[in-house]
Amino acid sequence: MSITHKIKETASLALKALYQIDVEPKSILVNATNVEFEGDYTVVLFAFIKQLKKSPEALGNEIGTYLVENNISLFSSFNIIKGFLNLVVNDSYWVNFLQQNHSNNSFGKKENTGKKVMVEYSSPNTNKPIHLGHLRNNFLGWSVAEIYKTNGYNTVKTCIVNDRGIHICKSMIAWQMFANGATPQSTNTKGDHFVGDYYVKFNDAYKAEIEKLVSDGMAKEQAEKEAPIMKATQQMLLGWEAGEPAIMQLWREMNGWVYEGFDVTYKTIGSDFDKTYYESNTYLLGKKIVQEGLAKGVFEQEEDSSVWIDLTNDGLDKKIVQRRDGTSVYITQDIGLAQQKFEEYGCDKSIYVIGDEQNYHMKVLKLICQKLQLPSADGIEHLSYGMVELPTGKMKSREGTVVDADEIVAEMIAISKQRTEELGKVKDFTAAELQQLYTTIGLGALKFFLLRVDPKKRMIFNPEESIDFHGFTGPFVQYTYARIKSVLRKLEVAISTMSEVKYSENLLKLEKDLIINLEQFPSIIEEAANENDPSKIAIYVFNLAKTFNSFYVEHSIANAENAEKKILRIQLATFTSSTIKTAMRLLGIDVPERM
RNA sequence: GGUCUCAUAGUUCAAUGGAUAGAAUAGAAGUUUCCUAAACUUUUGAUGCAAGUUCGAUUCUUGCUGGGACUACCA
């Protein structure tokens, strides 16, 4: 149990014993004590002052006295300032904590709860390569799944590939018109980029046709519909839906190129999936749902035979779920897929990692599922994340104003190579080891950069400034880890004999700060899972590394004042390094033994 | 127009209604006979505007200003 939780419980017991009032431990506010006052943790008393009609001083004294007298192993003293009860925790408590946990490699990990969570993330379109915004999605999804795993869940990572529809046909049409039979192989281009180029070519050609029609006197709206290339694309979509062999073959071939490209990227960035759904297989799901919904009276059919749901009583709009031609729309497919996922995996929770432009869609999806009383409905959660924007505005694939994922990854690796060479600390590494180190650091910088921010918030990426390697960054944390490991390597002999030795010293301030930081890790993981927010982990591990670095420059480990201090500090260093490693793993970031 | 969302140092980010709003970076000044200076120490600098609720508001409510998203029988 975490120490703040313990304090809440003891405070709740104190209130019960002293005043016969029942207060939920959860509702008691316990904070770290402000640095300017004496103490480690502070119980905020204002909430009880009114209720008990006592002065803050009297109340604080009574509770403080009770707490210290009844928890001798935990508290050594207290003081009261205004409505704040500051508690000083015994050094022996922290020392015990360190001794019990320093070599526990699964510190922070919860026992399996038997619960299952599905995380759907990545979900690419097969008409263009992935960009920086998709990377945010991939890193978030992977990390959230990992955080749940550590919190005792079984996880299923899924990906729904958007492999059909008008946008796919656009690339196909452009390829037919402009490629002269070129392939990724013949042009030595990565498959997803190859196809993406034709998507851009489509839009260029489309724009040119519209301009021509407009200059010939047609209204813009009509020109958008009448442009021959658009008509051809719509014709192709009909052909696809009818299963015309030539179109299907081209579709398979071009999607195949894209998948080859994606595989390379996924492998580099470390995204993986337990199950991949293809929209071409699932887009017809939900038809049955429409019938069931009509039978239950959740949906209504209009005279033109289109089917709707009226959500105006829930503050939303009327929403179509089936077109008058009987085909299903996006949301219906999603309902069907939600149902199918539940039938296949029976997850307690289903997290959708999807951009915040779909907040409304996801709200509607969950609401409809609830109205249909699907068993999966209440477990639906939308991990909504903000766009990654350039200083000039939004990234648009169509206009080519995107930060390409492969390019930014390559750039980060190149920068880490340059920096590593400048510092010249690993000259004895083999070529393969070097390459791995550059990748570890470059990807570490990129992942940390995208994960350290609250997912819900939009973030701005400035390509001119690139991504920093100093301060609140991945490489900073990686460096701290490598430095600890270096020290520990040199102290192997001392470590092998230290298990016998006990210490009972008073703690120095920086030693205590470090233990206090380490103690918080399990609570942080819980918080990150509750809020679907990996940035909590990133902020935590940065603070831990920072605290260690302050400790490290101030106090020597190898040349500690005495043997007991040496052992204590070795244990502190060991514990810090394993916690850093675990935390960074939760973000999908590796830590190097040397750098 | 309607709905949702965001606004904090020059910049990028923190802060379950709690004490003098934290970091990073940029700027200024320092630290390498001793465990990795991708580090450390010191320092300058911020809650869009106006009300309200509260012992206490960056946080909650309302209005205003300014961004963004959504508002398709597209996905």
Image (spheres, coloured by chain):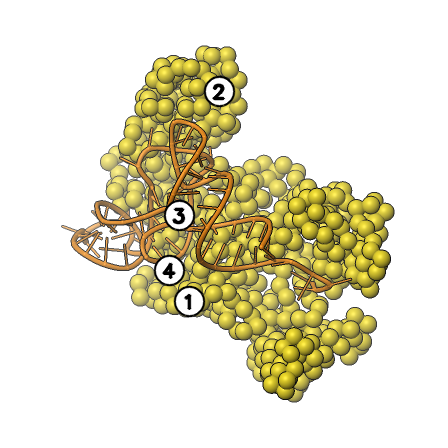
Chain colours: A yellow, B orange
Asked whether the beta carbons under mark 4 and mark 1 sit within 8 Å of each other, the answer is no
- Residue B70 lies, with reference to residue B23, above or below; the image says below
Lower sequence index among marks 3 and 2:
2
Amino acid identity at mark 2:
Ser
Q: Are marks 2 and 4 in contact (CB under 8 Å)?
A: no
Q: Which mark is residue A468?
A: 4
Q: N-terminal of the two: label 1 or label 3? A: 1
Mark 2–mark 1 distance (CA, rounded to whole Å): 52 Å
How many numbered discs, if any?
4
**Gap between marks 1 and 3, in whole Å?**
24 Å
Residue A301 % position (x, y): 83, 54
Residue A355 seen in the current view: yes
Q: Position of residue A192 (x, y in %)?
A: 60, 72
Give whichever of discs 2 and 4 has the lower sequence position: 2
Dots 3 and 4 on the same chain: yes
Identify the amino acid type marked 3: Phe
Amino acid type, residue under disc 1 in the picture: Pro
| SS type, badge 3 | helix
Label 1 neighbourhood size at 10 Å, few (<14), some (14-19), many (20+)? few
| Mark 4 or 1, closer to the camera | 1
Of residues A214 and A232, the one drawn nearer to the viewer in this rendering: A214
Q: Which residue is mark 1?
A: A463
Question: Label 1 lies in what chain?
Answer: A
Q: Residue at x 50, y 65 (%)?
A: A394
In this figure, which residue is indicated by the disc labeled 3?
A: A542
Q: Residue at x 36, y 25 (%)?
A: A84
Secondary structure beneath label 2 = helix
Relative height, residue A294 to residue A37 (above, below):
below
